Image (cartoon, rainbow, N blue to C red):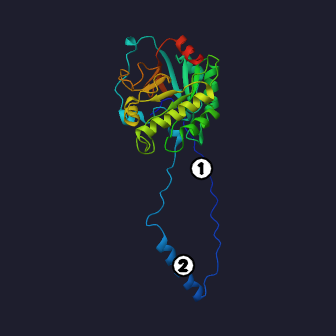
């Protein structure tokens, strides 16, 4: 589940025009029929023994930061905020939430937000403008994130799609660095069929392209278990990319190699705020510093 405070969806059936069948003569001359039968036999003999694999049906409206986490890693309680150092409350949303009441979110303590912008190289969040601009208007520091599909296209291709459709950055003190959501594959194999070295290369390609386009290295959203499994616990991103870690438990736990602390902790997939619940690891002025680069 992503939030208990989400808008209901109304799905409008799409009318499909009936197929038009053009009918030919009822009978063919015997010689012509025999020739067609022989052609069919030859074609059958040369056809592959198995049918082509159908392409997966994508459901980007169901994919968001954390959409796969609870199913793979479960939930183990909530953090005791009294034991935390100074933290700042925030949230992340996607099309799953629809139009968000940002003034209410701000009144309930939200100070920052990440908004899903894109997925792969074809999808854009239809609610992005309301969510991204609405959070800004309500006074939140906000940023955009991309849901990665590393088996579909290159890191550079997805980074360019992302930056071109909401994933930019400006030094206005109100815009977080663009973020990459890299987590369990919602469509199949955990690591998208990539080897650990290929996955690291894909993430590097995405990260470097975002940096060249925006001047900022993207925040990386992931879990420690996924990162260890799919990158071999690669330690090469901690010096450049802020960490947005997901763990639904009372403590943040062990972090991926290369990071000595998390910048953001997604600690629950529902709560007081719309969407997922997050703590920024520091006071509000540190969020402003991150936004300013």
Q: Residues within 10 Å of mark 2 (few under 14, many from 20)?
A: few
> Is 280 situated above or below 35?
above
Mark 1 and mark 2: Cα distance apart in space: 42 Å
Mark 1 lies on a secondary structure that is: loop
Report whether 191 appears left or right of 15: left
Where does residue 138 sit, x and y in percent of width and height? 62, 19
Task: Find residue 255 and report its image quarter.
Answer: top left
Where does residue 290 sit, x and y in percent of width and height? 55, 17
What residue is shown with label 2? 39
Where does residue 253 sit, x and y in percent of width and height? 35, 22
In terms of depth relative to the viewer, which is nearer, 110 or 84? 84
> Is 116 situated above or below 123?
above
- Residue visible at 38% across and 34% down in the picture: 232
- Residue visible at 55% across and 31% down in the picture: 208
What residue is shown with label 1? 13
- Residue visible at 54% across and 78% down in the picture: 39
Q: Earlier in the sequence, mark 1 or mark 2?
A: 1
Mark 2 lies on a secondary structure that is: helix
Task: Find residue 258 and report its image quarter.
Answer: top left
On the rendered image, what quadrant is the N terminus found in? top left
Task: Find residue 167 and report its image quarter.
Answer: top right
From the image, state whether disc 1 or disc 2 is nearer to you: 2
On the rendered image, what quadrant is the C terminus found in? top right
């Amino acid at each position: 589940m992503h939030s208990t405070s989400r808008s209901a969806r109304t799905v409008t059936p799409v009318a499909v025009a009936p197929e038009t069948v053009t009918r030919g003569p009822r009978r063919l001359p015997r010689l012509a029929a025999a020739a067609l039968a022989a052609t069919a036999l030859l074609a059958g003999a040369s056809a592959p023994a198995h049918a082509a694999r159908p392409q997966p049906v994508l459901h980007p409206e169901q994919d968001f930061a954390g959409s796969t986490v609870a199913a793979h890693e479960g939930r183990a309680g909530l953090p005791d905020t009294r034991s935390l150092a100074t933290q700042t409350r925030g949230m992340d949303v996607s099309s799953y939430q629809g139009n968000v009441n940002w003034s209410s979110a701000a009144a309930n303590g939200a100070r920052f937000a990440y908004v899903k912008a894109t997925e792969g190289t074809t999808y854009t969040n239809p609610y992005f403008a309301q969510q991204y601009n609405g959070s800004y208007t309500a006074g939140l520091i906000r940023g955009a994130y991309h849901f990665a599909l590393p088996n579909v296209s290159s890191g550079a291709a997805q980074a360019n799609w992302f930056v071109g459709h909401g994933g930019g950055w400006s030094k206005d003190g109100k815009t977080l660095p663009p973020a990459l959501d890299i987590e369990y594959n919602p469509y199949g194999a955990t690591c998208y069929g990539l080897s650990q070295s290929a996955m690291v290369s894909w993430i590097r390609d995405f990260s470097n392209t975002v940096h060249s386009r925006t001047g900022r290295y993207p925040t990386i959203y992931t879990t420690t278990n996924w990162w260890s499994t799919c990158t071999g616990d690669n330690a090469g991103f901690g010096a450049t990319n802020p960490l947005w870690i997901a763990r639904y438990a009372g403590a943040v736990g062990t972090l991926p190699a290369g990071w000595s602390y998390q910048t953001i902790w997604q600690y629950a997939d529902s709560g007081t705020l719309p969407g997922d619940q997050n703590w920024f690891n520091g006071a509000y002025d540190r969020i402003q510093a991150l936004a300013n680069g």
